Image (tube, helix red, strand yellow):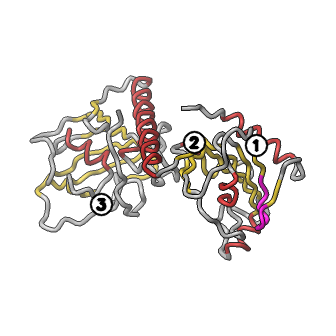
Amino acid sequence: MKKINSALFALLGILLLASCDNQGLKKTKSGLVYKIISDEKNPVVKKGQFVKLSFTEKVRDSVLFTSKDGLPAYVRIDSVPPNSYSPVEIFAMLRKGDSAVVFQLGDSIQKKSGQPLPPFIHKKDKIVLTLHVDDVFETEDLLKKDRSAQMDLLHAKEAKDVESYLQKNNIEATKTNLGTYVQIHTAGDGPLIDSGKEVSVLYTGKLFPSGKVFETNNEEGKPVLKFVVGSHSIIPGWDDGVRLLKKGATATFYIPAFLAYDQQQGPDKKVNENLIFDVKIVDVADAPQAAAHPNRPGMQGRPIPMPTTKPAK
């Protein structure tokens, strides 16, 4: 796969932010300002095709979204309302290998959408989207195949980052079949925890790799977290990791992002976050007849759908 030079994104941003009357800047009917850099060797994409985009979106000096932290964007080329004031307006002009920069103004976004701006965008802000067309696909099946390969690479990187952290810090941990890394501090007593058991847990969640605490119930007055193993009511890394533990055990889970919140926003307001949890198994019991689904650790009381996961290769 062709590797995209991240310096290109920075260069394009610098050149185009320096002057809004640079040669080559154009406007769509909605007033969207953009520039496309192309060698014109490949054909322009057609309606019904799919484009794979590497991208970085910034406001002021802050990165809002970037494919560097996760997966590229996959977009179907389709008809776009002429007054949408959206980057998708230029997608039908692109070719494989093209780079582009798109400018949006905060007040124009508000006027066009009729909705208030999010708190991190101000009316006078200029939002800059820099993108590159990595590939073009004729069918959705080809897109899915490519996306699956990209997902495998991302998951393998997440696991590798955890492994490197453990090695650097001389931490001995057992890797489960799914890919959670479990460092057992106190063995506990009785049989290993298995599906159908309700576990009561005290925990402290930490960001990876900083170790900054983002959530804990290990404080006076806070209830234990209860969940039924195998009920899909907890992030996969927890359901996976507790199966190496017994009642009374204390341990640390090092969880790759694909076994945590994956593409969903995690505790640090980012996607693809690896996480660390210190846990103590307070109790293990048979599941109640109608087990409720508790809140997920790390989401500050906000239940979320289970992420789709598969083990890293």
Q: Residues within 10 Å of mark 3 (few under 14, many from 20)?
A: few
Identify the residue under disc 2.
Answer: 135
Q: CA distance from mark 2 to mark 1?
A: 15 Å
What range of the chain is rendered magenta?
A: 28-34
Could you say which quadrant of the image residue 179 lies in?
top left
Which of marks 3 and 2 precedes in the sequence? Answer: 2
Q: Which mark is residue 223?
A: 3
Q: CA distance from mark 1 to mark 3?
A: 57 Å
Residue drawn where x is 79% and y is 63% of the image: 124
Task: Examine the structure image and report whether residue 83 is included in the region drawn in magenta.
Answer: no
Helix, strand or loop status at disc 2: strand
Task: Examine the structure image and report whether residue 33 is included in the region drawn in magenta.
Answer: yes
- Is 145 placed left or right of 39 in the picture? left
Residue drawn where x is 68% and y is 58% of the image: 87
The label nearer to you, 2 versus 3, is: 2
- Foreground of the two, 185 or 61: 61
Helix, strand or loop status at disc 3: loop
Q: How many marks?
A: 3
Helix, strand or loop status at disc 1: strand
The x and y percentages for residue 70 are 51, 44
- Is 169 placed left or right of 177 in the picture? right
